[in-house]
Amino acid sequence: MKTTKQAITQAILGVCILLSASVEAKLPPLTVDSAKAELGKRLFFDTRLSGDDSISCSSCHIPQNGFSHPEALSPAYTGSDGFRNSPSLINTAYKEVWFHDGRIGTNLNDVVRENITEDWLMNMDMRLMQERIKQDPIYVEMFQKAGLGEPSNGGVRKALPEYLKTLTSKNSPYDLNNLSALASQGQALFTGKAGCSQCHTGELFSDGLAHNTGVPENPDIFTDPMRHQSFLAFNMFMGIQDYLALKRDVGAHVQTHKADGSDRGSFITPSLRELTYTAPYMHNGMLSTLDEVVDFYNRGGGQDSNKDQRMKPLSLSKQEQAALVAFLESLSGDPLIGDEYEWLEYDFGYEYTEDWSNAKN
Ligand code: HEC
Ligand code: HEC
Protein backbone atom coordinates (compact mmCIF):
# COMPACT_ATOMS: atom_id res chain seq x y z
CA MET A 1 0.00 0.00 0.00
CA LYS A 2 1.18 3.50 -0.78
CA THR A 3 1.72 5.88 2.11
CA THR A 4 0.37 9.40 1.77
CA LYS A 5 3.95 10.64 1.46
CA GLN A 6 4.64 8.27 -1.45
CA ALA A 7 1.42 9.31 -3.13
CA ILE A 8 2.33 13.00 -2.80
CA THR A 9 5.86 12.37 -4.13
CA GLN A 10 4.39 10.50 -7.07
CA ALA A 11 1.89 13.27 -7.76
CA ILE A 12 4.68 15.88 -7.70
CA LEU A 13 6.78 13.71 -9.99
CA GLY A 14 3.83 13.38 -12.36
CA VAL A 15 3.41 17.14 -12.52
CA CYS A 16 7.15 17.55 -13.19
CA ILE A 17 6.99 15.02 -16.02
CA LEU A 18 3.97 16.82 -17.47
CA LEU A 19 5.76 20.17 -17.23
CA SER A 20 8.94 18.90 -18.86
CA ALA A 21 6.85 17.18 -21.54
CA SER A 22 5.14 20.46 -22.32
CA VAL A 23 8.54 22.14 -22.70
CA GLU A 24 9.78 19.36 -24.98
CA ALA A 25 6.56 19.53 -26.98
CA LYS A 26 7.74 22.86 -28.48
CA LEU A 27 8.99 22.35 -32.04
CA PRO A 28 11.35 19.34 -31.84
CA PRO A 29 14.83 19.76 -33.40
CA LEU A 30 15.17 18.23 -36.88
CA THR A 31 18.09 16.05 -37.94
CA VAL A 32 19.81 17.76 -40.85
CA ASP A 33 22.35 16.31 -43.28
CA SER A 34 24.70 19.30 -43.52
CA ALA A 35 26.26 18.52 -46.93
CA LYS A 36 22.81 18.16 -48.53
CA ALA A 37 21.55 21.30 -46.77
CA GLU A 38 24.58 23.30 -47.95
CA LEU A 39 23.87 22.22 -51.52
CA GLY A 40 20.20 23.12 -51.04
CA LYS A 41 21.25 26.55 -49.80
CA ARG A 42 23.21 27.26 -53.00
CA LEU A 43 20.34 26.04 -55.17
CA PHE A 44 17.87 28.25 -53.25
CA PHE A 45 19.79 31.41 -54.25
CA ASP A 46 20.59 30.36 -57.83
CA THR A 47 18.59 32.05 -60.63
CA ARG A 48 19.50 29.24 -63.06
CA LEU A 49 16.68 27.23 -61.50
CA SER A 50 14.16 29.45 -63.32
CA GLY A 51 13.44 29.03 -67.03
CA ASP A 52 14.95 32.34 -68.18
CA ASP A 53 17.58 32.56 -65.41
CA SER A 54 15.85 35.65 -63.93
CA ILE A 55 14.63 34.58 -60.47
CA SER A 56 15.68 32.25 -57.67
CA CYS A 57 13.63 30.85 -54.79
CA SER A 58 14.97 33.75 -52.73
CA SER A 59 13.41 36.34 -55.09
CA CYS A 60 9.99 35.52 -53.61
CA HIS A 61 11.08 34.05 -50.27
CA ILE A 62 13.41 36.78 -48.97
CA PRO A 63 15.49 35.95 -45.87
CA GLN A 64 15.06 39.47 -44.38
CA ASN A 65 11.29 39.05 -44.64
CA GLY A 66 11.18 35.72 -42.84
CA PHE A 67 11.52 33.98 -46.23
CA SER A 68 8.26 35.57 -47.43
CA HIS A 69 7.74 38.63 -49.67
CA PRO A 70 6.74 42.13 -48.48
CA GLU A 71 4.24 42.73 -51.30
CA ALA A 72 0.62 41.68 -50.75
CA LEU A 73 0.72 39.51 -53.87
CA SER A 74 3.86 37.64 -54.83
CA PRO A 75 5.96 38.46 -57.87
CA ALA A 76 5.91 35.81 -60.59
CA TYR A 77 7.81 34.50 -63.59
CA THR A 78 8.70 36.94 -66.39
CA GLY A 79 5.57 37.99 -68.29
CA SER A 80 3.14 37.22 -65.47
CA ASP A 81 2.38 38.37 -61.95
CA GLY A 82 1.27 36.57 -58.80
CA PHE A 83 -2.17 36.24 -57.17
CA ARG A 84 -1.24 34.87 -53.74
CA ASN A 85 0.88 36.16 -50.88
CA SER A 86 4.28 34.47 -50.76
CA PRO A 87 4.29 32.44 -47.51
CA SER A 88 7.14 32.29 -45.01
CA LEU A 89 9.30 29.19 -45.34
CA ILE A 90 10.37 29.23 -41.69
CA ASN A 91 9.10 26.00 -40.08
CA THR A 92 7.62 24.80 -43.38
CA ALA A 93 9.55 21.54 -42.79
CA TYR A 94 7.18 20.76 -39.89
CA LYS A 95 4.06 21.03 -42.02
CA GLU A 96 1.93 18.25 -43.43
CA VAL A 97 -0.01 20.34 -45.88
CA TRP A 98 1.33 23.13 -48.09
CA PHE A 99 0.15 26.14 -50.12
CA HIS A 100 -2.68 28.47 -49.05
CA ASP A 101 -5.21 26.08 -50.57
CA GLY A 102 -3.57 22.91 -49.19
CA ARG A 103 -3.20 21.43 -52.67
CA ILE A 104 -0.11 19.42 -51.72
CA GLY A 105 -0.33 17.10 -48.73
CA THR A 106 2.48 14.66 -49.46
CA ASN A 107 5.98 16.04 -48.82
CA LEU A 108 8.36 18.94 -49.45
CA ASN A 109 9.97 17.11 -52.34
CA ASP A 110 6.68 17.55 -54.26
CA VAL A 111 6.26 21.14 -53.06
CA VAL A 112 9.73 21.99 -54.36
CA ARG A 113 8.93 20.43 -57.75
CA GLU A 114 5.74 22.48 -57.97
CA ASN A 115 7.62 25.74 -57.25
CA ILE A 116 10.23 24.97 -59.90
CA THR A 117 7.94 23.80 -62.68
CA GLU A 118 4.76 25.90 -62.20
CA ASP A 119 4.62 28.42 -65.12
CA TRP A 120 3.85 31.45 -62.93
CA LEU A 121 6.55 30.56 -60.37
CA MET A 122 9.85 29.45 -61.96
CA ASN A 123 8.58 27.94 -65.21
CA MET A 124 11.43 25.47 -65.43
CA ASP A 125 11.68 22.15 -67.24
CA MET A 126 13.42 19.80 -64.82
CA ARG A 127 15.44 18.17 -67.62
CA LEU A 128 16.82 21.54 -68.68
CA MET A 129 17.59 22.37 -65.07
CA GLN A 130 19.52 19.14 -64.72
CA GLU A 131 21.61 19.91 -67.81
CA ARG A 132 22.34 23.43 -66.59
CA ILE A 133 23.54 22.44 -63.15
CA LYS A 134 25.61 19.57 -64.55
CA GLN A 135 27.72 22.15 -66.36
CA ASP A 136 28.73 23.90 -63.15
CA PRO A 137 31.82 22.25 -61.60
CA ILE A 138 30.91 23.56 -58.13
CA TYR A 139 27.64 21.61 -58.27
CA VAL A 140 29.38 18.50 -59.58
CA GLU A 141 31.54 18.58 -56.47
CA MET A 142 28.76 19.48 -54.05
CA PHE A 143 26.46 16.72 -55.31
CA GLN A 144 29.27 14.18 -54.87
CA LYS A 145 29.99 15.43 -51.37
CA ALA A 146 26.31 15.18 -50.47
CA GLY A 147 26.24 11.57 -51.63
CA LEU A 148 23.82 12.37 -54.44
CA GLY A 149 26.02 11.27 -57.35
CA GLU A 150 25.85 13.35 -60.53
CA PRO A 151 23.80 16.56 -60.46
CA SER A 152 20.23 15.45 -61.09
CA ASN A 153 16.65 16.58 -60.85
CA GLY A 154 16.03 14.03 -58.08
CA GLY A 155 19.05 15.31 -56.16
CA VAL A 156 17.77 18.90 -56.32
CA ARG A 157 14.45 17.72 -54.90
CA LYS A 158 16.29 16.10 -51.99
CA ALA A 159 18.74 18.95 -51.28
CA LEU A 160 16.26 21.85 -51.24
CA PRO A 161 13.98 20.22 -48.60
CA GLU A 162 17.09 19.47 -46.52
CA TYR A 163 18.00 23.17 -46.59
CA LEU A 164 14.41 24.09 -45.67
CA LYS A 165 14.85 21.95 -42.54
CA THR A 166 17.46 24.48 -41.32
CA LEU A 167 14.88 27.29 -41.44
CA THR A 168 13.24 26.85 -38.03
CA SER A 169 12.28 29.28 -35.27
CA LYS A 170 15.23 30.26 -33.09
CA ASN A 171 14.96 31.73 -29.58
CA SER A 172 11.49 33.25 -29.64
CA PRO A 173 10.38 34.59 -26.22
CA TYR A 174 7.60 31.99 -26.40
CA ASP A 175 10.08 29.11 -26.86
CA LEU A 176 12.31 30.49 -24.13
CA ASN A 177 9.32 30.72 -21.75
CA ASN A 178 10.07 34.41 -21.44
CA LEU A 179 6.76 36.17 -22.12
CA SER A 180 6.16 39.74 -20.93
CA ALA A 181 3.18 40.28 -18.62
CA LEU A 182 1.23 41.74 -21.54
CA ALA A 183 2.08 38.78 -23.80
CA SER A 184 1.02 36.32 -21.06
CA GLN A 185 -2.32 38.10 -20.81
CA GLY A 186 -2.53 37.80 -24.61
CA GLN A 187 -1.82 34.07 -24.42
CA ALA A 188 -4.70 33.62 -21.97
CA LEU A 189 -7.00 35.51 -24.35
CA PHE A 190 -5.68 33.49 -27.32
CA THR A 191 -6.65 30.18 -25.72
CA GLY A 192 -9.67 31.60 -23.86
CA LYS A 193 -12.05 34.45 -24.62
CA ALA A 194 -10.70 35.27 -28.11
CA GLY A 195 -10.97 31.62 -29.22
CA CYS A 196 -7.94 31.75 -31.52
CA SER A 197 -6.70 28.30 -30.50
CA GLN A 198 -9.83 26.70 -31.95
CA CYS A 199 -7.96 26.77 -35.28
CA HIS A 200 -4.44 27.91 -34.39
CA THR A 201 -3.45 24.77 -32.48
CA GLY A 202 -0.23 23.01 -31.47
CA GLU A 203 3.30 24.33 -31.65
CA LEU A 204 2.91 25.64 -35.20
CA PHE A 205 -0.33 27.34 -34.17
CA SER A 206 -2.14 25.71 -37.07
CA ASP A 207 -4.58 22.81 -37.33
CA GLY A 208 -3.53 22.31 -40.97
CA LEU A 209 -7.18 22.59 -42.06
CA ALA A 210 -9.02 25.02 -44.32
CA HIS A 211 -11.52 27.52 -42.88
CA ASN A 212 -13.33 30.56 -44.19
CA THR A 213 -12.65 33.68 -42.13
CA GLY A 214 -14.09 36.12 -44.69
CA VAL A 215 -10.85 37.84 -45.70
CA PRO A 216 -11.85 40.37 -48.41
CA GLU A 217 -10.71 39.74 -51.99
CA ASN A 218 -7.63 41.56 -53.21
CA PRO A 219 -9.00 43.66 -56.12
CA ASP A 220 -5.59 43.69 -57.88
CA ILE A 221 -6.19 40.06 -58.92
CA PHE A 222 -9.15 41.17 -61.02
CA THR A 223 -8.02 44.60 -62.24
CA ASP A 224 -4.40 43.83 -63.09
CA PRO A 225 -4.37 41.81 -66.35
CA MET A 226 -0.99 40.22 -65.51
CA ARG A 227 -2.28 38.87 -62.22
CA HIS A 228 -5.65 37.96 -63.68
CA GLN A 229 -4.15 35.84 -66.45
CA SER A 230 -2.10 33.75 -63.98
CA PHE A 231 -5.16 33.45 -61.74
CA LEU A 232 -7.35 32.23 -64.63
CA ALA A 233 -4.74 29.80 -65.94
CA PHE A 234 -4.26 28.35 -62.46
CA ASN A 235 -8.01 27.83 -61.88
CA MET A 236 -8.50 26.32 -65.33
CA PHE A 237 -5.66 23.93 -64.66
CA MET A 238 -7.17 23.00 -61.27
CA GLY A 239 -10.43 21.98 -62.97
CA ILE A 240 -12.65 24.86 -61.78
CA GLN A 241 -15.54 24.77 -64.31
CA ASP A 242 -16.59 28.42 -63.98
CA TYR A 243 -13.04 29.78 -63.92
CA LEU A 244 -13.81 32.54 -66.44
CA ALA A 245 -16.60 33.92 -64.25
CA LEU A 246 -14.74 33.81 -60.92
CA LYS A 247 -14.88 36.96 -58.82
CA ARG A 248 -13.01 35.42 -55.91
CA ASP A 249 -10.11 33.16 -55.04
CA VAL A 250 -11.88 29.85 -54.35
CA GLY A 251 -9.04 28.64 -52.09
CA ALA A 252 -9.26 25.05 -50.86
CA HIS A 253 -12.15 24.35 -53.27
CA VAL A 254 -9.43 23.49 -55.84
CA GLN A 255 -8.70 20.33 -53.89
CA THR A 256 -12.02 19.55 -52.16
CA HIS A 257 -14.36 20.46 -55.09
CA LYS A 258 -17.53 20.37 -52.95
CA ALA A 259 -20.54 20.42 -55.27
CA ASP A 260 -22.46 22.93 -53.11
CA GLY A 261 -19.48 25.31 -53.15
CA SER A 262 -19.48 25.67 -49.34
CA ASP A 263 -15.70 25.21 -49.40
CA ARG A 264 -15.17 28.26 -51.63
CA GLY A 265 -13.10 30.97 -50.00
CA SER A 266 -11.57 28.75 -47.32
CA PHE A 267 -7.82 28.73 -46.79
CA ILE A 268 -5.41 26.65 -44.75
CA THR A 269 -4.84 28.01 -41.24
CA PRO A 270 -1.32 29.48 -41.40
CA SER A 271 1.31 29.06 -38.72
CA LEU A 272 1.56 32.13 -36.46
CA ARG A 273 5.29 31.94 -35.92
CA GLU A 274 7.71 34.65 -37.14
CA LEU A 275 4.89 37.09 -38.00
CA THR A 276 6.97 40.16 -37.11
CA TYR A 277 9.00 39.52 -40.28
CA THR A 278 6.27 38.40 -42.66
CA ALA A 279 3.75 41.25 -43.14
CA PRO A 280 1.39 41.66 -44.93
CA TYR A 281 -0.92 38.87 -43.84
CA MET A 282 -3.50 36.39 -45.16
CA HIS A 283 -3.47 34.45 -48.46
CA ASN A 284 -3.74 37.69 -50.43
CA GLY A 285 -1.90 40.13 -48.16
CA MET A 286 -5.06 42.14 -47.48
CA LEU A 287 -4.18 42.91 -43.83
CA SER A 288 -1.04 44.99 -43.36
CA THR A 289 -0.31 44.82 -39.64
CA LEU A 290 -0.96 42.58 -36.64
CA ASP A 291 -3.14 45.37 -35.16
CA GLU A 292 -5.30 45.13 -38.28
CA VAL A 293 -5.49 41.34 -37.98
CA VAL A 294 -6.62 41.49 -34.35
CA ASP A 295 -9.14 44.24 -35.22
CA PHE A 296 -10.42 42.01 -38.06
CA TYR A 297 -11.05 39.13 -35.62
CA ASN A 298 -12.52 41.48 -33.02
CA ARG A 299 -15.16 42.45 -35.58
CA GLY A 300 -15.93 38.76 -36.18
CA GLY A 301 -13.94 38.47 -39.41
CA GLY A 302 -15.17 39.57 -42.84
CA GLN A 303 -18.39 39.10 -44.82
CA ASP A 304 -18.88 35.72 -46.42
CA SER A 305 -21.86 33.39 -46.72
CA ASN A 306 -19.46 30.45 -46.21
CA LYS A 307 -17.87 31.98 -43.11
CA ASP A 308 -16.94 29.62 -40.26
CA GLN A 309 -19.55 29.65 -37.46
CA ARG A 310 -16.84 30.30 -34.88
CA MET A 311 -16.05 33.71 -36.33
CA LYS A 312 -18.06 36.03 -34.01
CA PRO A 313 -17.46 39.57 -32.75
CA LEU A 314 -15.21 39.29 -29.69
CA SER A 315 -15.80 42.60 -27.84
CA LEU A 316 -12.14 42.87 -26.83
CA SER A 317 -11.08 46.14 -25.21
CA LYS A 318 -8.22 48.14 -26.75
CA GLN A 319 -5.98 46.86 -23.95
CA GLU A 320 -6.92 43.23 -24.66
CA GLN A 321 -6.26 43.70 -28.37
CA ALA A 322 -2.80 45.07 -27.54
CA ALA A 323 -2.19 42.02 -25.34
CA LEU A 324 -3.10 39.65 -28.19
CA VAL A 325 -0.71 41.48 -30.51
CA ALA A 326 2.04 41.22 -27.86
CA PHE A 327 1.47 37.47 -27.65
CA LEU A 328 1.63 37.10 -31.44
CA GLU A 329 4.90 39.08 -31.44
CA SER A 330 6.38 36.78 -28.80
CA LEU A 331 6.19 33.93 -31.35
CA SER A 332 8.99 35.47 -33.45
CA GLY A 333 12.63 34.61 -32.85
CA ASP A 334 16.03 35.61 -34.23
CA PRO A 335 16.12 36.63 -37.91
CA LEU A 336 17.48 33.81 -40.11
CA ILE A 337 20.03 35.87 -42.01
CA GLY A 338 23.76 35.71 -42.66
CA ASP A 339 26.10 33.00 -43.82
CA GLU A 340 24.38 30.18 -41.93
CA TYR A 341 21.16 30.64 -43.89
CA GLU A 342 22.10 32.56 -47.04
CA TRP A 343 24.42 31.80 -49.97
CA LEU A 344 26.19 35.14 -49.88
CA GLU A 345 28.96 34.46 -52.36
CA TYR A 346 27.82 35.12 -55.92
CA ASP A 347 29.64 32.30 -57.70
CA PHE A 348 27.03 31.28 -60.24
CA GLY A 349 28.95 32.43 -63.28
CA TYR A 350 30.90 29.57 -64.86
CA GLU A 351 32.75 28.71 -68.05
CA TYR A 352 30.41 27.16 -70.59
CA THR A 353 31.45 23.74 -71.83
CA GLU A 354 32.91 24.34 -75.33
CA ASP A 355 32.20 20.95 -76.84
CA TRP A 356 28.98 20.27 -74.91
CA SER A 357 27.82 17.36 -77.08
CA ASN A 358 30.84 15.34 -75.94
CA ALA A 359 30.78 16.52 -72.33
CA LYS A 360 31.13 13.76 -69.75
CA ASN A 361 29.10 15.09 -66.82
C1 HEC B 1 7.83 33.76 -58.26
C2 HEC B 1 7.75 33.66 -56.82
C3 HEC B 1 8.19 32.36 -56.19
C4 HEC B 1 9.35 31.64 -56.43
C5 HEC B 1 10.46 31.96 -57.41
C6 HEC B 1 9.31 30.51 -55.52
N1 HEC B 1 8.18 30.54 -54.76
FE1 HEC B 1 7.70 29.26 -53.28
N2 HEC B 1 5.88 30.08 -53.19
C7 HEC B 1 5.46 31.23 -53.84
C8 HEC B 1 4.05 31.46 -53.59
C9 HEC B 1 3.23 32.63 -54.11
C10 HEC B 1 3.62 30.39 -52.79
C11 HEC B 1 2.18 30.14 -52.32
C12 HEC B 1 1.37 29.66 -53.51
C13 HEC B 1 -0.04 29.23 -53.18
O1 HEC B 1 -0.39 29.11 -52.01
O2 HEC B 1 -0.77 28.96 -54.13
C14 HEC B 1 4.80 29.56 -52.53
C15 HEC B 1 4.81 28.42 -51.71
C16 HEC B 1 5.95 27.73 -51.34
C17 HEC B 1 6.01 26.69 -50.35
C18 HEC B 1 4.86 26.21 -49.48
C19 HEC B 1 4.90 26.94 -48.16
C20 HEC B 1 3.79 26.58 -47.22
O3 HEC B 1 4.06 26.62 -46.03
O4 HEC B 1 2.67 26.27 -47.66
C21 HEC B 1 7.31 26.24 -50.31
C22 HEC B 1 7.87 25.18 -49.40
C23 HEC B 1 8.05 27.00 -51.28
N3 HEC B 1 7.20 27.91 -51.89
C24 HEC B 1 9.38 26.82 -51.56
C25 HEC B 1 10.01 27.37 -52.68
C26 HEC B 1 11.29 26.93 -53.19
C27 HEC B 1 12.17 25.86 -52.57
C28 HEC B 1 11.53 27.66 -54.31
C29 HEC B 1 12.66 27.53 -55.27
C30 HEC B 1 12.81 26.22 -55.91
C31 HEC B 1 10.41 28.58 -54.46
N4 HEC B 1 9.50 28.36 -53.46
C32 HEC B 1 10.30 29.53 -55.46
C33 HEC B 1 6.26 32.04 -54.61
C34 HEC B 1 7.47 31.66 -55.13
C1 HEC C 1 -12.15 29.47 -37.58
C2 HEC C 1 -10.70 29.27 -37.49
C3 HEC C 1 -9.86 30.43 -37.01
C4 HEC C 1 -9.96 31.14 -35.85
C5 HEC C 1 -10.98 30.98 -34.72
C6 HEC C 1 -8.88 32.11 -35.87
N1 HEC C 1 -8.15 31.99 -37.01
FE1 HEC C 1 -6.56 33.12 -37.56
N2 HEC C 1 -6.58 32.28 -39.40
C7 HEC C 1 -7.43 31.26 -39.81
C8 HEC C 1 -7.30 31.07 -41.22
C9 HEC C 1 -8.04 30.03 -42.06
C10 HEC C 1 -6.37 32.03 -41.67
C11 HEC C 1 -5.92 32.27 -43.12
C12 HEC C 1 -6.97 33.07 -43.82
C13 HEC C 1 -6.55 33.51 -45.21
O1 HEC C 1 -5.41 33.32 -45.61
O2 HEC C 1 -7.39 34.07 -45.92
C14 HEC C 1 -5.93 32.76 -40.48
C15 HEC C 1 -4.97 33.76 -40.50
C16 HEC C 1 -4.47 34.39 -39.37
C17 HEC C 1 -3.33 35.29 -39.35
C18 HEC C 1 -2.46 35.68 -40.54
C19 HEC C 1 -1.19 34.85 -40.58
C20 HEC C 1 -0.40 35.04 -41.86
O3 HEC C 1 0.76 34.62 -41.87
O4 HEC C 1 -0.91 35.56 -42.84
C21 HEC C 1 -3.18 35.71 -38.06
C22 HEC C 1 -2.11 36.65 -37.51
C23 HEC C 1 -4.23 35.08 -37.27
N3 HEC C 1 -4.98 34.28 -38.09
C24 HEC C 1 -4.42 35.25 -35.91
C25 HEC C 1 -5.57 34.83 -35.25
C26 HEC C 1 -5.96 35.31 -33.95
C27 HEC C 1 -5.17 36.29 -33.11
C28 HEC C 1 -7.15 34.70 -33.67
C29 HEC C 1 -8.02 34.92 -32.46
C30 HEC C 1 -8.50 36.28 -32.25
C31 HEC C 1 -7.50 33.84 -34.79
N4 HEC C 1 -6.51 33.95 -35.72
C32 HEC C 1 -8.63 33.03 -34.85
C33 HEC C 1 -8.28 30.54 -38.99
C34 HEC C 1 -8.72 30.98 -37.76
Image (cartoon, helix red, strand yellow):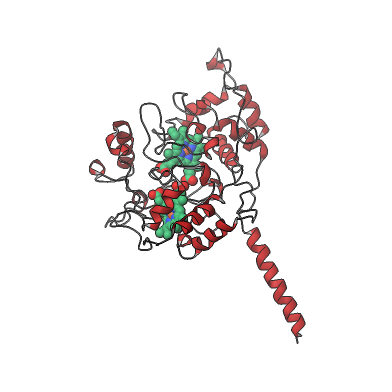
Vertical order, 73 against 55 (above or below): below
Foreground residue, 143 or 67?
A: 67
> Residue at the spot x=45%, y=39% of the render?
86
Q: Where's residue 48, x and y in %?
A: 51, 25
Along the horizontal axis of the image, is 67 left or right of 294?
right
Looking at the rendering, which quadrant does residue 117 occupy? top left
Q: Where's residue 52, x and y in %?
A: 44, 23
Vertical order, 157 against 206 (above or below): above
Q: Residue furthest left?
A: 245
> Residue at the spot x=36%, y=30% of the render?
80
Vertical order, 300 against 332 (above or below): below
> Residue at the spot x=59%, y=58% of the render?
181
Looking at the rendering, which quadrant does residue 32 occupy? top right
Foreground residue, 247 or 196?
A: 196
Q: Where's residue 306, x and y in %?
A: 30, 57
Foreground residue, 333 or 348?
A: 333
